[in-house]
Amino acid sequence: MCLAAAAFAVLCVLVVRAVPYLPEPDDYAYRASVVAMTDGHFFTLSGAQAHALAVRLAPQLGGRRLGPGPGGGPVQWVRLPGGRWISEKDPGYPYLAVAFQALGLIRLAPLLYAALACLGWYAGGRRWLGGSGGAAAAGLYCSSGAAILFAWRDYLPAFTEASLIAAGTAARCGPAAGQGRSPSASPRWVPTCGICQLT
Protein backbone atom coordinates (compact mmCIF):
# COMPACT_ATOMS: atom_id res chain seq x y z
CA MET A 1 0.00 0.00 0.00
CA CYS A 2 2.87 2.37 0.79
CA LEU A 3 4.34 2.03 -2.71
CA ALA A 4 0.96 2.68 -4.33
CA ALA A 5 0.39 5.73 -2.12
CA ALA A 6 3.90 7.00 -2.89
CA ALA A 7 3.33 6.65 -6.65
CA PHE A 8 0.07 8.56 -6.37
CA ALA A 9 1.69 11.23 -4.17
CA VAL A 10 4.43 11.78 -6.76
CA LEU A 11 1.79 12.14 -9.48
CA CYS A 12 -0.08 14.68 -7.33
CA VAL A 13 3.04 16.74 -6.71
CA LEU A 14 3.92 16.79 -10.41
CA VAL A 15 0.40 17.80 -11.43
CA VAL A 16 -0.01 20.51 -8.79
CA ARG A 17 3.41 21.97 -9.59
CA ALA A 18 2.72 22.14 -13.33
CA VAL A 19 1.86 25.60 -14.62
CA PRO A 20 -1.78 25.76 -15.78
CA TYR A 21 -1.70 25.74 -19.55
CA LEU A 22 -4.27 25.11 -22.29
CA PRO A 23 -2.25 23.80 -25.25
CA GLU A 24 -5.07 22.94 -27.68
CA PRO A 25 -8.46 24.26 -28.81
CA ASP A 26 -10.06 21.23 -27.12
CA ASP A 27 -8.92 22.50 -23.72
CA TYR A 28 -10.54 25.89 -24.39
CA ALA A 29 -13.80 24.29 -25.57
CA TYR A 30 -14.09 22.11 -22.46
CA ARG A 31 -13.15 25.01 -20.20
CA ALA A 32 -15.95 27.08 -21.74
CA SER A 33 -18.43 24.26 -21.04
CA VAL A 34 -17.28 23.90 -17.43
CA VAL A 35 -17.39 27.65 -16.80
CA ALA A 36 -20.83 27.92 -18.46
CA MET A 37 -22.12 25.20 -16.13
CA THR A 38 -20.59 26.99 -13.16
CA ASP A 39 -22.59 30.04 -14.25
CA GLY A 40 -25.77 27.92 -14.29
CA HIS A 41 -26.04 27.21 -18.04
CA PHE A 42 -26.07 23.41 -18.33
CA PHE A 43 -27.10 22.86 -21.95
CA THR A 44 -26.96 25.74 -24.41
CA LEU A 45 -26.22 29.47 -24.41
CA SER A 46 -27.94 32.36 -26.10
CA GLY A 47 -25.91 34.31 -28.65
CA ALA A 48 -25.19 37.08 -26.14
CA GLN A 49 -24.18 34.59 -23.42
CA ALA A 50 -21.92 32.70 -25.83
CA HIS A 51 -20.22 35.91 -26.97
CA ALA A 52 -19.74 37.14 -23.39
CA LEU A 53 -18.26 33.77 -22.39
CA ALA A 54 -15.96 33.77 -25.42
CA VAL A 55 -14.69 37.27 -24.60
CA ARG A 56 -14.20 36.37 -20.94
CA LEU A 57 -12.25 33.19 -21.72
CA ALA A 58 -10.42 34.34 -24.85
CA PRO A 59 -6.86 32.99 -24.90
CA GLN A 60 -3.95 35.30 -24.35
CA LEU A 61 -1.05 35.22 -26.81
CA GLY A 62 1.95 37.10 -25.54
CA GLY A 63 0.66 40.43 -24.25
CA ARG A 64 -2.62 40.51 -26.17
CA ARG A 65 -5.91 38.73 -25.73
CA LEU A 66 -7.33 37.02 -28.82
CA GLY A 67 -10.92 37.64 -29.86
CA PRO A 68 -13.77 35.09 -29.88
CA GLY A 69 -13.88 32.31 -32.47
CA PRO A 70 -15.81 32.44 -35.77
CA GLY A 71 -19.35 33.71 -35.29
CA GLY A 72 -18.55 35.25 -31.92
CA GLY A 73 -18.86 32.13 -29.74
CA PRO A 74 -16.29 30.14 -27.78
CA VAL A 75 -13.72 28.02 -29.62
CA GLN A 76 -15.19 24.74 -30.97
CA TRP A 77 -18.75 25.73 -30.14
CA VAL A 78 -21.42 25.80 -32.86
CA ARG A 79 -24.54 27.84 -33.39
CA LEU A 80 -27.75 25.81 -33.60
CA PRO A 81 -30.49 26.64 -36.13
CA GLY A 82 -32.46 28.47 -33.43
CA GLY A 83 -29.53 30.79 -32.70
CA ARG A 84 -28.39 29.16 -29.45
CA TRP A 85 -24.83 27.87 -28.98
CA ILE A 86 -23.60 24.45 -27.89
CA SER A 87 -20.17 22.88 -27.52
CA GLU A 88 -18.97 20.41 -30.14
CA LYS A 89 -17.34 18.37 -27.40
CA ASP A 90 -18.50 15.39 -25.37
CA PRO A 91 -20.91 16.82 -22.78
CA GLY A 92 -20.14 14.30 -20.02
CA TYR A 93 -16.88 15.59 -18.55
CA PRO A 94 -18.08 19.09 -17.63
CA TYR A 95 -20.68 17.54 -15.33
CA LEU A 96 -17.85 15.72 -13.52
CA ALA A 97 -15.73 18.87 -13.28
CA VAL A 98 -18.23 21.63 -12.53
CA ALA A 99 -18.16 21.18 -8.74
CA PHE A 100 -14.37 21.48 -8.72
CA GLN A 101 -14.55 24.64 -10.86
CA ALA A 102 -17.17 26.17 -8.57
CA LEU A 103 -14.91 25.55 -5.56
CA GLY A 104 -11.82 26.87 -7.36
CA LEU A 105 -10.22 23.39 -7.25
CA ILE A 106 -10.31 22.39 -10.90
CA ARG A 107 -6.71 21.19 -10.72
CA LEU A 108 -7.79 18.48 -8.28
CA ALA A 109 -10.51 17.03 -10.54
CA PRO A 110 -8.23 14.70 -12.53
CA LEU A 111 -6.45 13.68 -9.33
CA LEU A 112 -9.64 12.63 -7.56
CA TYR A 113 -10.55 10.33 -10.44
CA ALA A 114 -6.94 9.09 -10.57
CA ALA A 115 -7.28 8.21 -6.87
CA LEU A 116 -10.32 6.06 -7.72
CA ALA A 117 -8.31 4.35 -10.45
CA CYS A 118 -5.40 3.70 -8.09
CA LEU A 119 -7.69 2.27 -5.42
CA GLY A 120 -9.31 0.03 -8.03
CA TRP A 121 -5.98 -1.10 -9.43
CA TYR A 122 -4.60 -1.70 -5.97
CA ALA A 123 -7.54 -3.80 -4.82
CA GLY A 124 -7.96 -5.67 -8.11
CA GLY A 125 -4.23 -6.21 -8.65
CA ARG A 126 -3.71 -7.42 -5.12
CA ARG A 127 -6.51 -9.97 -5.34
CA TRP A 128 -5.52 -11.23 -8.76
CA LEU A 129 -1.73 -10.91 -8.80
CA GLY A 130 -0.89 -11.27 -5.11
CA GLY A 131 0.59 -9.02 -2.42
CA SER A 132 2.77 -6.71 -4.55
CA GLY A 133 0.47 -6.85 -7.57
CA GLY A 134 -1.74 -4.04 -6.30
CA ALA A 135 1.15 -1.65 -5.69
CA ALA A 136 2.65 -2.50 -9.08
CA ALA A 137 -0.66 -1.90 -10.86
CA ALA A 138 -1.22 1.47 -9.14
CA GLY A 139 2.41 2.49 -9.72
CA LEU A 140 2.24 1.59 -13.40
CA TYR A 141 -0.95 3.60 -13.78
CA CYS A 142 0.51 6.69 -12.09
CA SER A 143 3.52 6.56 -14.42
CA SER A 144 1.51 5.69 -17.53
CA GLY A 145 1.43 7.68 -20.74
CA ALA A 146 -2.09 8.84 -19.91
CA ALA A 147 -0.89 10.27 -16.61
CA ILE A 148 2.21 11.91 -18.03
CA LEU A 149 0.46 13.47 -21.01
CA PHE A 150 -2.93 14.39 -19.61
CA ALA A 151 -3.12 14.54 -15.79
CA TRP A 152 -1.97 18.17 -15.67
CA ARG A 153 -4.53 19.33 -18.25
CA ASP A 154 -7.33 20.46 -15.94
CA TYR A 155 -10.09 20.81 -18.52
CA LEU A 156 -9.35 17.93 -20.88
CA PRO A 157 -11.30 14.75 -20.06
CA ALA A 158 -8.78 12.22 -21.39
CA PHE A 159 -7.16 11.37 -18.06
CA THR A 160 -10.43 11.41 -16.11
CA GLU A 161 -11.97 9.04 -18.66
CA ALA A 162 -8.92 6.77 -18.50
CA SER A 163 -9.12 6.81 -14.71
CA LEU A 164 -12.80 5.87 -14.64
CA ILE A 165 -12.18 3.07 -17.16
CA ALA A 166 -9.22 1.87 -15.08
CA ALA A 167 -11.24 1.93 -11.86
CA GLY A 168 -14.05 -0.06 -13.47
CA THR A 169 -11.71 -2.56 -15.11
CA ALA A 170 -9.75 -3.12 -11.93
CA ALA A 171 -12.93 -3.49 -9.91
CA ARG A 172 -13.96 -6.29 -12.27
CA CYS A 173 -10.59 -8.06 -11.87
CA GLY A 174 -10.96 -8.43 -8.10
CA PRO A 175 -14.34 -10.23 -7.98
CA ALA A 176 -13.33 -12.54 -10.83
CA ALA A 177 -10.22 -13.51 -8.89
CA GLY A 178 -12.21 -14.16 -5.74
CA GLN A 179 -14.64 -16.66 -7.27
CA GLY A 180 -12.43 -19.61 -6.49
CA ARG A 181 -11.34 -20.30 -10.04
CA SER A 182 -8.27 -22.39 -10.62
CA PRO A 183 -5.16 -20.66 -12.02
CA SER A 184 -5.77 -22.29 -15.40
CA ALA A 185 -9.36 -20.96 -15.50
CA SER A 186 -8.38 -17.41 -14.51
CA PRO A 187 -4.85 -16.80 -15.84
CA ARG A 188 -2.88 -14.04 -14.18
CA TRP A 189 -1.75 -12.64 -17.51
CA VAL A 190 -5.27 -11.32 -18.26
CA PRO A 191 -5.20 -8.37 -15.79
CA THR A 192 -1.50 -7.90 -16.44
CA CYS A 193 -2.26 -7.31 -20.13
CA GLY A 194 -5.03 -4.92 -19.14
CA ILE A 195 -2.65 -2.93 -16.96
CA CYS A 196 -0.06 -2.78 -19.73
CA GLN A 197 -2.66 -1.67 -22.26
CA LEU A 198 -3.71 1.26 -20.05
CA THR A 199 -0.10 2.22 -19.36
Image (cartoon, rainbow, N blue to C red):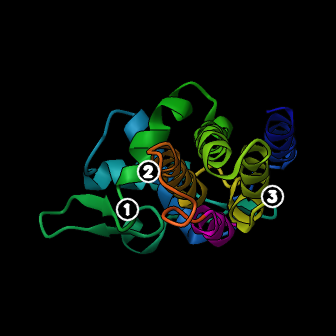
Q: Is residue 136 magenta?
A: no
- CB within 8 Å, label 2 to label 1: yes
Neighbor class of circle 3 (other Cα within 10 Å; few <14, some 14-19, many 20+) is: some
> Residue 93 — which label?
2
Q: Quadrant of residue 23?
A: bottom right
Q: Quadrant of residue 84?
A: bottom left
Q: What segment carries the magenta color?
A: 188-199
Residue at image coords 43%, 70%: 76
Q: Position of residue 133 (x, y in %)?
A: 74, 49
Q: Position of residue 65 (x, y in %)?
A: 67, 60
Gap in angstroms between the C-alphas marked 2 and 1: 7 Å
Residue extending farthest to the bottom is 70
In terms of secondary structure, where does tag 2 sit?
Answer: helix
Q: Amino acid at mark 2?
A: Tyr
- From the image, tell me which residue sits under label 3: 143
Q: Could you tell whether 71 is left or right of 82 in the image? A: right
Front position among marks 3 and 1: 3
Above or below, 176 relative to 25: above
Q: Earlier in the sequence, mark 3 or mark 1?
A: 1
Evaluate whether residue 16 shows in this view: no
Q: Amino acid at mark 1?
A: Asp
In terms of secondary structure, where does tag 1 sit?
Answer: loop
- From the image, tell me which residue sits under label 1: 90
Above or below, 85 relative to 88: above
- CB within 8 Å, label 3 to label 1: no
Gap in angstroms between the C-alphas marked 2 and 3: 23 Å
Front position among marks 2 and 3: 3
